[in-house]
Amino acid sequence: MMRAYDPRGMHWRHPFGDLEVALVALAAVMGVWTQSPAWVGAVAAGSLLARRRPVLLLVCLVFGLAGVWRSRVTWDGATPRHLGHYTGWVPVVGDPAPFNNGLRVTVEIDGERFDAWAYGSSRRRLLDRQAGEFVYVDGERRPQTSNVRRPRLRHVVGRFDLQVVGDPAPFNNGLRVTVEIDDERFDAWAYGSSRRRLLDRQAGDFVYVDGERRPQTSNVRRARLRHVVGRFDLQVVGDWREGSPLYR
């Protein structure tokens, strides 16, 4: 009778072992990546054959199908909210990328990103532009019709058909922030919605960011005096809680 109430005889352990946890994670990853319930079902069936535990099958299906649903919702949300004609100043997002005789430039309009292809005189005007600079454009915003997946991975929702490209803007409404990534410091320039998210942040705050690290190409000496090793091209700035260790 005493043994039934003896706490020393209780040995708590997680109901799933390492292999079971790996199978659940695989089901979730396959659901998010493929957006296919068939792949989730295949992983769940494999988990049942490997471990002979019906509860593991159920957990794999729940996590995998939840990943499918969430991935489809997020993917379908990467569509343009505003289309049609636009004229005005726009920030260049990322350095222009030459392709054969054309030049691909990503611009942000009303908080949305569009890929623009420039040729001829428009190409010459945009060739020396860098991320964060403003240019005056006139053109049409259209939905993406081909190779949709690759642009959406860069948070691009459509294409912008350039008609007129003006001179670079003589002003600068950007916000420079210095971030630390892997114990290295980078300068990042924020514009538009990214600027508004970072404007009230202070030193020591955590923010969630998505972007690319690049070497410093200008004002190298001044940057190194501040222990900055490069620049960070911001693509997405999330809420500060998403980057906080306490949040995770």
Image: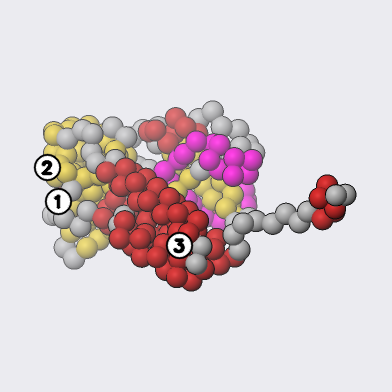
Q: Rate crowding at label 1 as few (under 14), some (14 to 19) or many (20 or more) other CA atoms within 10 Å.
A: few
Left or right: 81 in relation to 242: left
Residue drawn at x 54%, y 50% is 186
The residue to which callout 2 is attached is 163
The residue to which callout 3 is attached is 26
Whichever of labels 3 and 1 marks the residue nearer the N terminus, that label is 3
- Across and down, in percent, residue 34 comes to 32, 59
Mark 2 and mark 1: Cα distance apart in space: 19 Å
The quadrant of the picture occupied by the C terminus is top right
Q: Amino acid at mark 1?
A: Thr
Residue range in magenta is 225-248
Q: Rate crowding at label 3 as few (under 14), some (14 to 19) or many (20 or more) other CA atoms within 10 Å.
A: some
Residue drawn at x 23%, y 48% is 115
Whichever of labels 2 and 1 marks the residue nearer the N terminus, that label is 1
Tell me the element at label 2: strand
Q: Are marks 2 and 1 in contact (CB under 8 Å)?
A: no
Residue drawn at x 50%, y 30% is 199
Tell me the element at label 3: helix
Residue drawn at x 37%, y 45% is 70
- Across and down, in percent, residue 132 comes to 38, 43
Residue 94 visible: no
Mark 3 and mark 1: Cα distance apart in space: 32 Å
Whichever of labels 2 and 3 marks the residue nearer the N terminus, that label is 3
Mark 2 and mark 3: Cα distance apart in space: 47 Å
The residue to which callout 1 is attached is 145
- Across and down, in percent, residue 143 comes to 16, 44
Q: Amino acid at mark 3?
A: Leu
